[in-house]
Image (cartoon, rainbow, N blue to C red):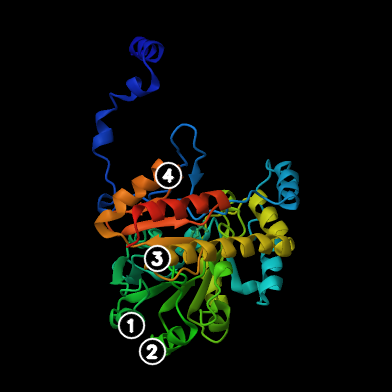
Amino acid sequence: MSDTTESVTESATPQEAYAAPPASATTVRLREVLAQMPDYKPGKPAAAPAGVTAYKLSSNENPYGPLPSVLAAIDDAATTVNRYPDMAVTALTERLAKALDVPAECIATGTGSVAVLAQIVNAACDAGDEVVFAWRSFEAYPIVTQLAGAKPVMVGLDEQARHRLDAMFAAITDRTRVILVCTPNNPTGPCVHQAELEAFLDKVPDDVIVVVDEAYVEFVRDPEAVRGLDVWRHRPNVVVLRTFSKAYGLAGLRVGYAVAHPPVAAALRKTATPFGVNSVAQVAAIASLDAFDELNERVESLVAERDRVVQALADQGWRLPQSDANFVWFPLGPDSTAFSTACSDAGLTVRQYGDDGVRVTIGEVEANSRLIEVAAAFGPR
Ligand SMILES: *Cc1c(COP(=O)(O)O)cnc(C)c1O
């Protein structure tokens, strides 16, 4: 027995040694839902032909690296990583409460707002319960829903790639526990308007949680757009979801939060991974809130870049949906692959969604200018 083991470990690579797993590996039972679920597809890393600078425009990340003050806080926090983080995330929660003008007990954090979303669905759904959301929307929604044993109910967007709240209302059944409203909608760009959301919420049964996912709220400039916190304040079933991954540029540290009324916030703490939000992330998020003015200058320049790209594309004759986020959506149908290839030939890694369209993140000025050139050469649609 030990002879065989040794000869395998000496002569074979770990992959080869693994090639003959014990027979029992084929009989373990996994949940059937996993086989039906899509894998989460992350944006591809930057890649470019020789001699061309590559830009990653595939994950809606902030192109700016951390501010010096944030980096210093990260550096400092790194010296204590032998200790568990503060499980209650006390300092960050209090800092957020102050910044948002809400009670600290109404804030629940998680390892990215994707994780907080999973906490919400796990807190609200038993097997077979339903989660209603628009489609196409954030690709984590069906995954998180199915992992919780719940059923995704997907309601198509309208021809301007906006939410159809009337159709979402019609999709509510007595199994509906959660409704997700993504505003601005990832990957298509338009925001939901405050008046339409209020009218929708007037009708939705008040035992159904309505999540307003505001991952891109800092980039919104539409004056009619949803103001999630205003809606939340007078509606006990509303939860606002925010993240440090996009405007705040901390995608790699994984921290997001919900603003929810106390019973819901408490449920989200129960469904969180213990010690999930690490100490470096907690400190970096606080330093980012402290440096808001400086970070906001970057947000303003990204918004200006978005507006430059949108205007240039419109001048070329493109008809694209409104974007209130840090990306633009090209609803190209069967031409999506050709456009995605044209982008990658120019060193731009973008995000293709099958035959639906292509999402391109607003990035460095040079990257955005190159996108404008690629779009002109491709020809407006
Ligand atoms: C990016 C994104 C999130 C947040 O992601 P985290 O990095 O997990 O905080 C949430 N919702 C939408 C719609 C997003 O696009």
User: Is disc 1 surrounded by few (<14), some (14 to 19) or many (20+) residues within 10 Å?
Assistant: some
Give 266 or 133, whichever is nearer the viewer: 133
Element at label 2:
helix
Return the residue at label 2.
203
Residue 198 visible in rendering: yes
Q: CA distance from mark 2 to mark 3?
A: 26 Å
Return the residue at label 4.
44
Q: Residue 2's spot in the image, x, y percent?
A: 37, 12
User: Is disc 3 surrounded by few (<14), some (14 to 19) or many (20+) residues within 10 Å?
Assistant: many
Give 181 or 179, whichever is nearer the viewer: 181
> Residue 188 shows which numbered tag?
3
Amino acid type shown at disc 1:
Phe
Quadrant location of the N terminus in the rendered image: top left
Of circles 2 and 3, which is in front? 3
In the displayed structure, 297 sits above or below 79; it is below
> Residue 358 shows which numbered tag?
none
The answer to whether the residues at label 4 and label 3 have Cβ atoms under 8 Å apart is no
User: Is disc 2 surrounded by few (<14), some (14 to 19) or many (20+) residues within 10 Å?
Assistant: few
Q: Is residue 126 left or right of residue 71?
A: left
Give me the residue at 33% from left, 76% from top: 176
The answer to whether the residues at label 1 and label 3 have Cβ atoms under 8 Å apart is no
Of circles 4 and 2, which is in front? 4
Which badge, 2 or 3, is on the more N-terminal residue?
3
Q: Residue 291: name its quadrant.
A: bottom right
Return the residue at label 1.
169
Amino acid type shown at disc 2:
Lys
